[in-house]
Image (tube, helix red, strand yellow):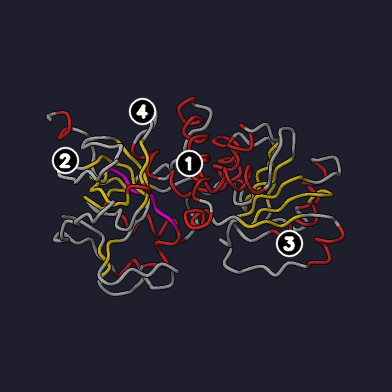
């Protein structure tokens, strides 16, 4: 089968699509997936070079997030809620291939309202954004929420969710183009360009001097945001897309009576597994009702052009979720 197989650690630009990758064999508790679409993540760029925390043994197929169908020849483990042909989304190693295996507890039903392209990018970004706002920041209707990197995959989801949850949302990004994306697809109430000096003054002006109640930060601007965080405000540390890990001044945390909380959604499987179903139930209801809608980058890449998609992501030319298409239609299933 086709697959973006990493045989030696290298930058993705030096890796070519393989056409002779063996079909993976599911183990106990796993199912086989016909992959229709896969979502690109920045950690893919790191993983091909051996710089990501998850290091599969060589050779391995790249890609984590997917949407597709349970394969016709998939084993069905005891208690499995799926049958061959069911539309699903989830995560596992090897999404950039015609087929992949995934653990049963990492697969969810894909709502009828969503396409494979939309479903491919759900698994990582949306629960991160929801739990960051609801579980960690304890967001309440009417609160001011500042979202940095607001046009990115996690950011644009956080903007949408903060609006749905009744917040007053300020989207922050480093260019006017990305701010417009946050407005058009996320529904942000206000826009702030954080590439400008003293951008925090714009936030204070928007909030009539009070500052924001919540800062949702996937980029590494928590310390900068302290200047516009309200008394008893909460800052959610989601990631460090800017590249450096911040060292936060604890005196400001004390003086402003603020809270800084972290959000590592992947760790919930080990430490708070019961929370996962709660978050997904809430999210799937939002998708089914149309109150939330995944945002997909305007160019969808074929599997043969995966490297171009990773290049665009690496150079920050994208917004929302970048998607690669692997299968084009459901013709094979229509005949079954």
Query: What residue would you read off at disc 2?
Result: 72
The Cα atoms of the two marked residues, 2 and 3, are separated by 51 Å
Q: Provide the residue span drawn in magenta.
A: 36-41
Q: Quote the CA–CA distance across marks 2 and 4.
A: 20 Å
Mark positioned earlier in the residue sequence (3 or 1): 3
Could you say where residue 219 lies in the image, as x and y percent from the top left? 60, 58
**1 vs 2, front mark:** 1
CB contact under 8 Å: marks 1 and 2: no
Q: Residue at x 82, y 43 (%)?
A: 205
- Nearest to viewer (mark 4 / mark 3): 4
Task: Verify CB contact (< 8 Å) between mark 3 and mark 1.
Answer: no
- Residue 35 appears at what percent x and percent y? 26, 46
Q: Earlier in the sequence, mark 2 or mark 3?
A: 2
Q: Residues within 10 Å of mark 4 (few under 14, many from 20)?
A: few
- Nearer to us of marks 2 and 3 is 2
Mark 1 to mark 2: distance in Å?
27 Å
Q: Residue at x 41, y 48 (%)?
A: 322
Residue 174 badge: none
Mark 1 or mark 4: whose residue is earlier in sequence: 4
Label located before the other in sequence (1 or 2): 2
Looking at the image, do the residues carrying marks 2 and 4 touch, with CB atoms under 8 Å apart? no
**Mark 4 vs mark 3, CA separation in Å:** 42 Å
Which residue was labeled with disc 3? 223
Task: Give me the residue at 60% from left, 69% from top.
Answer: 244
């Amino acid at each position: 089968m086709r697959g973006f197989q990493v045989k030696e650690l290298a930058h993705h630009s030096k890796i070519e699509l393989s056409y002779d990758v063996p079909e993976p064999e599911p183990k106990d508790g796993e199912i086989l997936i016909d992959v229709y679409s896969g979502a690109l993540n920045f950690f893919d760029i790191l993983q091909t070079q051996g710089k990501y925390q998850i290091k599969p043994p060589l050779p391995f197929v790249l890609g984590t997030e997917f949407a597709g169908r349970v394969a016709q020849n998939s084993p069905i483990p005891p208690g499995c809620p799926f049958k061959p042909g069911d539309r699903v989304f989830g995560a596992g190693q090897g999404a950039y291939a015609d087929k992949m295996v995934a653990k049963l507890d990492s697969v969810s039903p894909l709502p009828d309202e969503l396409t494979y392209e939309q479903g491919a990018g759900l698994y990582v970004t949306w629960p991160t954004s929801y739990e960051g706002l609801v579980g960690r920041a304890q967001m309440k209707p009417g609160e001011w929420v500042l979202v940095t990197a607001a046009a990115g995959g996690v950011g644009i989801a956080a903007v949408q969710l903060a609006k749905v949850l009744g917040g007053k949302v300020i989207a922050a990004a480093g260019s006017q183009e990305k701010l417009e994306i946050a407005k058009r697809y996320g529904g942000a109430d206000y826009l702030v360009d954080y590439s400008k000096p003293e951008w925090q003054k714009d936030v204070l002006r928007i909030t009539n001097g009070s500052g924001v109640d919540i800062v949702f930060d996937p980029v590494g601007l928590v310390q900068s945001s302290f200047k516009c965080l309200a008394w008893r405000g909460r800052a959610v540390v989601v990631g460090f897309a800017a590249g450096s890990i911040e060292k936060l001044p604890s005196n400001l945390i004390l003086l402003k009576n603020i809270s800084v909380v972290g959000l590592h959604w992947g760790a919930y499987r080990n430490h708070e597994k019961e929370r996962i179903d709660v978050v997904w139930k809430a999210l799937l209801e939002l998708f089914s009702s149309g109150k939330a809608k995944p945002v997909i980058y305007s160019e969808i890449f074929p599997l043969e052009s995966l490297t171009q998609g990773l290049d665009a992501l690496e150079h920050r030319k994208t917004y929302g979720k970048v998607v690669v298409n692997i299968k084009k239609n459901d013709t094979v299933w229509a005949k079954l």
